[in-house]
Amino acid sequence: MVTKDCKNSGDCEDRRFYKHIFVCLFSFIVLILFIILIIFLVLRPHKPKFTLQDATVYKLNFTQGYEPYHMTTTVQVTLSSHNPNNRIGVYYDKLDVYLDYKSQQITVPTAITSVYQGHNDVTVWSPFLFGVDIPVAPYLCISVTEDQTAGLVLMHVRTSGKLRWKVGSWTSGHYHIHVNCPAFMSVDGNGVYRFQQITDCTVDV
C-alpha cells in the first residue's frame, strides 16, 4: 500500500492556502462587526420622541339597547416624531396607528408612510382613523355617555410597528416600537369635541 504524503502534495498545499484565506477573511469580518458593535454601544441610540399635536373628532356614535353594541368613529390625529440622536438615523419601516378608549380598540389600524429620519430630524403625520360598526363591550357605551356628560373624554392614540437604526453605512435589524399618546378631549353641550393640549407620548423600543 502506498501512503500519500500530504506535505509533498500540491493539493494539500492548495488546501492549506484556501484555509488560510478563509480564516483571514472570517477574522476580518468578525473584526468589522465587533468595531460596529462597539460604535453602536458607545453611541447608544436614544428612543425617538413622539408628540400628539392635535386630534379632531368628526364622528363618535354608538348603538345601544341591544347586543352586540357597536361604535362608529372618525378621528384625524397629528403625530410628530423627533430623532434626538446626533449621529444615528432611524428607518421607520412599518407603522400602524389606531385609537382606543378604556383599553378597547375602536378604530382599525391605519398604516402611515414609511420614512427615513436623519439626525435630529422631525417627521409629522396626520392620518385619519376609522372604525365602522366596531363591536364593543356594553360598558363602553355607558362610559362614553358618562364622560360626555362630564365634559371630558380621555382616549389613547397608539402606534406600533418596526424601526431600524442607521450608523454610517451600517443598518441594524428590526426593532419593535410601541407608542402611546393620551388624547384629552373636552365635550360641550352640543357634542362637539375639542382637543385640549399637546401631549408627550410614551415610547417603548
Image: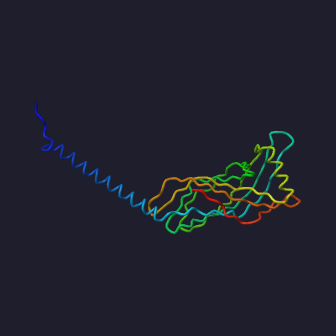
Residue at 56% across / 68% down in the picture? 120
The N terminus appears in which quarter of the rendering?
Answer: top left
Drawn side of residue 16 relative to residue 163, left or right: left
Residue at 13% across / 37% down in the picture? 4
Residue 201 locus on image (x, y percent): 66, 61
Total count of labels: 0
The C terminus appears in which quarter of the rendering?
Answer: bottom right
Outermost residue to the right: 189
Outermost residue to the left: 2
Drawn side of residue 25 relative to residue 118, left or right: left
Which scheme is used to colour this image of the protein? rainbow
Residue 170 locus on image (x, y percent): 44, 59
Outermost residue to the top: 1
Instruction: Choose between 16 and 116: the one closer to the eye.
Output: 16
Residue 76 locus on image (x, y percent): 73, 58
Residue at 84% across / 60% down in the picture? 151
Residue at 43% across / 59% down in the picture? 37
Residue 193 locus on image (x, y percent): 81, 60
Instruction: Choose between 202 and 80: the one closer to the eye.
Output: 202
